[in-house]
Amino acid sequence: MFEFELIATDGPARAGRWHLPHGTVETPCFMPVGTNGTVRALAPSDLRDIGATLILGNTYHLHLRPGEDVVAKLGGLHRFMAWDGPILTDSGGFQVFSLEGLRKVTEEGVEFRSHIDGSARFLSPERVMEIEWALGPDVAMAFDHVLPGQSTQADQRDALDRTLRWLERCRDRHRELAALAPRAQTMVPIIQGGIYPDLRRVALSGILGLGQWNALAVGGLSVGEPKEAMRAVLGDLETMLPRALPRYLMGVGFPEDVVASIGLGLDLADCVAPTRMGRNGTAFTDDGPVNIRNARFREDAAPLDDGCDCETCRTFSRGYLRHLFAAEELLGLRLLSLHNVRYLIRLAGRAREAILAGRFAGWSADWMARYSIREQA
Amino acid sequence: MFEFELIATDGPARAGRWHLPHGTVETPCFMPVGTNGTVRALAPSDLRDIGATLILGNTYHLHLRPGEDVVAKLGGLHRFMAWDGPILTDSGGFQVFSLEGLRKVTEEGVEFRSHIDGSARFLSPERVMEIEWALGPDVAMAFDHVLPGQSTQADQRDALDRTLRWLERCRDRHRELAALAPRAQTMVPIIQGGIYPDLRRVALSGILGLGQWNALAVGGLSVGEPKEAMRAVLGDLETMLPRALPRYLMGVGFPEDVVASIGLGLDLADCVAPTRMGRNGTAFTDDGPVNIRNARFREDAAPLDDGCDCETCRTFSRGYLRHLFAAEELLGLRLLSLHNVRYLIRLAGRAREAILAGRFAGWSADWMARYSIREQA
């Protein structure tokens, strides 16, 4: 259980399989985000139809509403959201450090106010482990201290040291919970250190010294730093990461970032971009993002993306989709979200095929060239 | 084509089959309403899954946006909304007479302002026939003059006389269009006359004198008049309606009204209630309407309605559905809309079975008794 099979490499890019309690995940893999126990506008049946395997849930949001006790009473997160495939929950670290409002960080944990009702809340490494245990995902992320992308090296050092101390506490509490009532859940540490390669190495080394892990995550990227800095950090870090473990790049999921991260040796990515962009009327295509509200689609009988096999592209014309957005119809939000998530799942799948065929560099260069044309136009 | 088979009667209640170009409709039948070329929050695949046969489109809305020319260029309403089953379009009469704002009725037609952009518009019987011809449904409703439920007998007489004169013009224009480019579309007249049984008889007699029809509709009900008045009018009218034609009660579709109208000999009904109520968090069940936002459902693991076979009831708990509404998640709107439309389709199907078994009166009394309990509680 939790074994990662590395099937092929092509430069830094990797193709593998991650065996989780609720199913096997082929990597590279894009994970749709189900913030409130639902991938926005999509049903579990949609997710199955578009080949989703590993779904992300947000501990912060589920803790505040409906509360992990309610989820547990309703059978755990799998039963609650009716997703019987693998689930990963983040730890809430990103949310408590990025949401607006009062927040107080101590060595013990983080005091903050609920964005829903303003109530005072406290999360600590131990508490987060308990919440994730109650939610019951296959993969539970460790509680980390996340800083904005522009933070100084000194601040990043402080946060990563705290993240390591918290990881030790997460590890101990997770072991206690598992000893009390065995359950197939793995806890995954998060590498912090901002845009500073040296700090990333310190974080990695600290993590590897704290236990045997089934996967590693890279956090604190795509939080406001320049894209070049992110890619430089990942490029350096890749040379140090153990080959045997799957690598999850957190919160990075625009198509160009997913392809780039796969090229930099990452295996898993997640982002709300496909559903958020979809709700705004923007669709991902191989020719770049397209805004379906544009008047030029008014009488366009072609599918959104003629290379796509999703229900939206198989069934509806651009003219109809444009009409749904013009008329503010709910179906439009769903159909573009469905397409965008499918686009990213298929993109990871196409990258996987290219890796297996030993032609990832050429494939990704071709994809990027075509995808970038319209962005610049 | 357009033949109605009357299979069984049980008192005034009837079970039949209506053969339309895009498929056969078993009656009694509930029609979901697809105002803007989409049954709100539902995809055509959902509608197929829940057994929808005949879908309603709104001529007024589709004329204003995207325009019948766009729908025609994109292959007609069936192709546009990707529904290959039967479609009926209303005539816009109800909308132009019930929407707020400037409106001028002459013998020629109705001047009004678009609710979207305030532009001046004009609809006449001929224009409506042209629009519905361009949209291309199986069934096109005649253009009628609809008055509020509290209108005087004199006003209703005036409106029904105008509706009859307009019907003649609809008939002539529809014949011309069919002669120019034959297409399997039937045009259906609407009986007006408000809550006055005598006027309803005048309207019916006028309509029957104007041509051979494939169906008859009853309009101008459920527009503010007392429920008893509606039922009295329908009870009287039923004795006069030709047995051989299907009878469509327009815009009446709360569960109790659907059961009552079937008992009064009506075959078809439509209403936005199931989707509108669904979006507000209200679900139809045999025990009456239920508001899923209620705190008592917080940890309720039971399905919304344990007699229901829809995806919502097969898949999700009340606790989860309540959470979706609390978190304002789009999926909640869809899941309750899906259930409510399925509830009404299944309700019409259950009524049909009862009629075929000769036990409609007992079935409907039992259903009504159970459904009404919670309403009063």
Image (spheres, coloured by chain):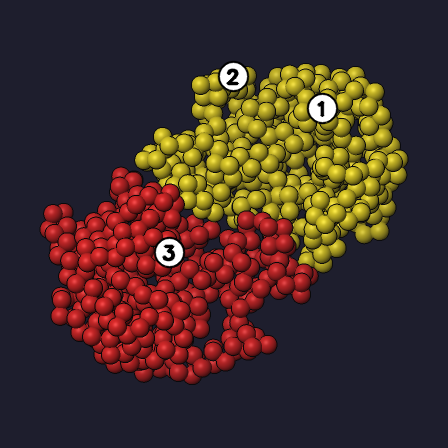
Chain colours: A red, B yellow
Disc 2 is placed on an element classified as helix
Q: Which amino acid does label 1 sit on?
A: Gly
Q: Which amino acid does label 3 sit on?
A: Leu
Q: Which of marks 1 and 3 is in front?
A: 3
Disc 3 is placed on an element classified as loop
On the same chain: label 3 and label 2?
no
How many numbered discs?
3
Instruction: Please identify the quarter of the rendering in which residue B206 is found.
Output: top right
| Mark 3 crowd level (few <14, some 14–19, many ≥20, 10 Å Cα) | few
Residue at left 76%, top 30%?
B146
Residue at left 36%, top 78%?
A229
Tell me, for residue B149, which label it has, or none. Answer: 1
Q: Position of residue A256 (x, y in %)?
A: 44, 73
Q: Position of residue B223 (x, y in %)?
A: 68, 27
Instruction: Please identify the quarter of the rendering in which residue B219 is found.
Output: top right
Label located before the other in sequence (1 or 2):
1
- Left or right? Give the position of A122 relative to B361: left
Q: Circle 1 marks a residue in which chain?
A: B
Q: Distance between the residues labelled 1 and 3?
A: 52 Å
Front residue of B49 and B300: B300
Tell me, for residue B365, which label it has, or none. Answer: 2
Is the C terminus of chain B in the top left, top right, bottom left or bottom right quadrant?
Answer: top left
Q: Where is residue A59 in the image (x, y as percent from the top left)?
A: 30, 52
Q: Distance between the residues labelled 3 and 2?
A: 56 Å
Residue A113 appears in the figure: yes
Q: Distance between the residues labelled 1 and 2?
A: 27 Å
Residue at left 87%, top 32%?
B165
Disc 1 + disc 2, Cβ < 8 Å: no
Does residue A291 sit above or below B195 in this rendering? below
Does residue B164 sit above or below A113 in this rendering? above
Front residue of B224 and A125: A125
Front residue of B131 and A200: A200
